[in-house]
Amino acid sequence: MPRRVVRSERTADGGSQPDDLDLHQIAVIVEEGDAHGNLIALLQRTQSELGYVPEPAVDEIARLTGVPASRIYGIITFYAQFSTVPSGRHKIFVCHGTACHVAGATRITEAFEQELDVPDGKSTPDMEFSLDSVACMGACSQAPVMRIDAETYGNLSADHTRKVIRELVKELGLEAQYPGVSGAGSPRGGGDA
Ligand code: FES
C-alpha cells in the first residue's frame, strides 16, 4: 500500500498548499534508477515528474537509498535545475555571472519580466513558466546566456530574447494566455539599449 504524506502544491502565486504526495512514485523512481551511481538522475526524474523536489521526496529518497538527506540537499542547492518549491512547467534560467552581467544579462531578464509578466525568482500565475537568475553556466564565451528547459541560448540580445519568447509561446499553444506576446506580429523593441 503506497504511503501518502503531505506535500506542497503549486499555487497561483508560487506559494504552497497541502496536498498528497504518493511516496510509491518515489519508490518507483528509486527502483528504476541507479541510486548510488547516479543520484542526480534520480533527482532529475523526481523534478520532472513532480515539477520540483519536495522535502518528503528528499526524505524518502534518503531512506530508500541510504544517502544522507543533507547530501541530497547539497546537490539540490548546487544545481539550479532543482527546486524544493513548486516552479513553472517551463524553467527559464538567465545567467547573471560576471561575463553575462557585463554583456547585458539584466536586459535579458527584463525581457522575460515584461513579456511574460513574471518577476525574477517567481513563476507565472498559471505555473507555465518560472524565471530565475543563476550563476555562471560555463558558456562565458557566448555571453549573455540563458536556458529554457533543456535548451541553451547564447549571444543574446533583448530583441532576440523577445523573439524566442514569442516562438515558445506559440509552440506551446499558449497564445490565449499570453495575448501580449503572441499578438506581436513583428519583433518588439527598438534595440537593446
Ligand atoms: S557568466 Fe554566464 S556563462 Fe559564464
Image (cartoon, rainbow, N blue to C red):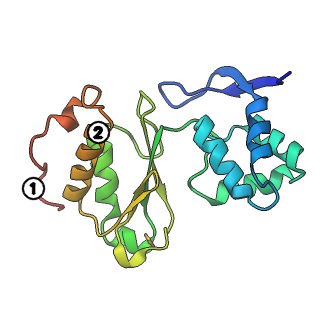
Image point (53%, 38%), residue name? 87
Ligand 1, image quadrant it occupies: bottom left
Q: Is mark 1 within 8 Å of ligand 1?
A: no
- Position of 72 compared to 103: left or right? right
What is the quadrant of the N terminus in the image? top right
Image point (12%, 50%), residue name? 187
Q: Earlier in the sequence, mark 2 or mark 1?
A: 2
Quadrant of the image occupied by residue 130 = top left
Q: Vertical placement of 104 versus 121: above or below?
A: below
Q: Position of residue 8 (x, y in %)?
A: 66, 28
Other-residue count near label 1 (Cα within 10 Å), few / some / many at <14 / 14–19 / ≥20? few
**What is the secondary structure assignment of the residue under circle 1?**
loop
Q: Vertical placement of 35 versus 5: above or below?
A: below
Mark sitting on residue 169 = 2
Q: Residue furthest front?
A: 32
Task: Depth check: give the residue in front, 174 or 157.
Answer: 174
- Position of 79 compared to 54: left or right? left
**What is the secondary structure assignment of the residue under circle 2?**
helix
- Mark 2 to mark 1 CA distance (whole Å): 21 Å
Q: Residue furthest bottom?
A: 141
Mark 2 residue type: Val
Image point (56%, 29%), residue name? 15
Quadrant of the image occupied by residue 21 = top right
**Residue bearing the label numbered 1:** 190
Mark 1 residue type: Gly
Q: Position of residue 168 (x, y in %)?
A: 30, 44
Mark sitting on residue 113 = none
Image point (49%, 68%), residue name? 137
